[in-house]
Amino acid sequence: MSVLSGKKIVLGVSGGIAAYKTATLVRLFIKAGAQVQVIMTPASKDFVTPLTLSTLSKNPVHSAFFNEEDENAQWNNHVELGLWADLMLIAPATANTLSKMANGNCDNLLIATYLSAKCPVYFAPAMDLDMYKHPSTISSFSLLQKFGNIMIPAESGELASGLSGEGRMAEPENIITFLENDLESKLPLRGKKILITAGPTYEAIDPVRFIGNHSSGKMGFDIAQSAANNGAEVTLVSGPTALSVSHPNINLIRVTSAKEMYEACHQHFHNTDVAICAAAVADYRPKKVAEQKIKKAADDFTIELEKTEDILASLGKIKENQLLIGFALETENEIENAKLKIQKKNLDLIVLNSLQDEGAGFAKSTNKITFINKDFVVEPMPLKSKQAVADDIINKVIVHYEKNS
Ligand code: CTP
């Protein structure tokens, strides 16, 4: 999956012959799963039509501050566009547009949006070879880079003038690769290894029956996805669930019982930076597993149970520098019970679910949690989707490493 998936991209197109390549660029962004809004300078429309780019981007193209011919025209809000974007790319960036960007010469919607954007801005210059080498252009490059903007260097080859040299806009495929590499290198959990447990465990009674629970695994899978999206290498140890993973950075290990989950976790824990135990592990298992299917006989039937391994507590016992995060599902004295679990299991952070909260718990797409850290700072969170809760949990990990870097 591309790091561009889900990203909101503002593509600013200025007036150079390379503008025709933005059709391919927009198509590649959409293929990568990004959302694209295109802003065109008036001159760029001579090289590629707004209809082409709006069709490919599946969004109206913005060009003027408002359309004079349309009496219902609305003001094109450059501030909103600038704030909407996760990333802005100016491609092709002509010498004229680069100079305006460098000097804040705000005479069109593209420059106004550029000046309003709070996100990373990339620019892909395109011009003739002598223009590319001119001190004025070089000074624009250097000023823009000083502002923190990122240059996607032009490539060498045949130019529209018939001359050959440096100045061709980077090919759309190369622009995509450049952006992906740059974004990946800046992901906050890059280089971190995260172990996550998810789902229920099934404890066998006989070859056809087991003791299990209603956990869907969704919370743990969403945490894994969020961690991977932030650059972590994830080992996801999951009990039986219908869920699957698609992110290449998630190594899914499927297990059935608490014992198998325990073994898989201990195999990976020494080589991990963070462990997040979101699995609903069975607390007890049948002491003896019948080799054959148990036949019904007497009116009463008793199964003797024994405790399973407490995976989280066992990791707490051996932890060195790892950040250890557990869950607690409580029905009464929630905060006090969760604090006891932090101490008992040697945790850095606990994610408390209270079944008294509507919208929290198993087989729901929402969750309402309270964070409690090892210093007993209590932070209740509003009801959110499990995906948003997963992002909140991973944000705690990111903040931990930011503070300790
Ligand atoms: N956990 C675990 N292994 C177990 C049981 C629980 O790793 N055998 C983990 C869960 O993944 C969760 C945390 O421990 O992160 C809390 O689980 P919970 O069932 O709420 O608490 P218990 O410690 O089992 O205590 P109790 O059931 O008495 O509340």
Image (cartoon, grey):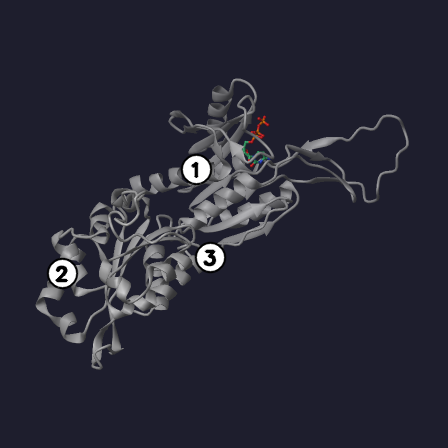
Reading the image, the residue beneath label 2 is 140
Regarding residue 272, the answer to whether it shows in the image is: no
Amino acid type at image mark 2: Ser
For discs 1 and 2, the disc positioned in front in the rendered view: 2
- Cα separation between marks 1 and 3: 22 Å
Packing grade of label 1 (10 A; few <14, some 14-19, many >=20) is many
* Residue 64 sits above or below residue 220 on the image: below
Residue 164 sits in which quadrant?
Answer: bottom left
Disc on the earlier residue, 3 or 2:
3
Identify which residue is drawn at 26% across, 70% down.
17
Reading the image, the residue beneath label 3 is 1
Regarding residue 357, the answer to whether it shows in the image is: yes
Amino acid type at image mark 1: Ile
Q: Position of residue 349 (x, y in %)?
A: 43, 32
Q: Nearer the viewer, residue 50 or 57?
A: 50
Side (left or right) of 161 relative to 302: left
Q: Position of residue 335 (x, y in %)?
A: 47, 21
Q: Position of residue 94 (x, y in %)?
A: 20, 64
Identify which residue is drawn at 14% across, 71% down.
131
Identify which residue is drawn at 27% across, 51% down.
120
For discs 3 and 2, the disc positioned in front in the rendered view: 2
Q: Nearer the viewer, residue 327 or 258?
A: 327
Amino acid type at image mark 3: Met
* Residue 125 sits above or below residue 297 on the image: below
Q: Position of residue 252 (x, y in %)?
A: 56, 52
Please report contact status of discs 1 and 2: CB closer than 8 Å, yes or no.
no
Identify which residue is drawn at 26% across, 63% down.
44
Reading the image, the residue beneath label 1 is 393
Q: Name the mark on residue 305.
A: none
SS class, disc 3: loop
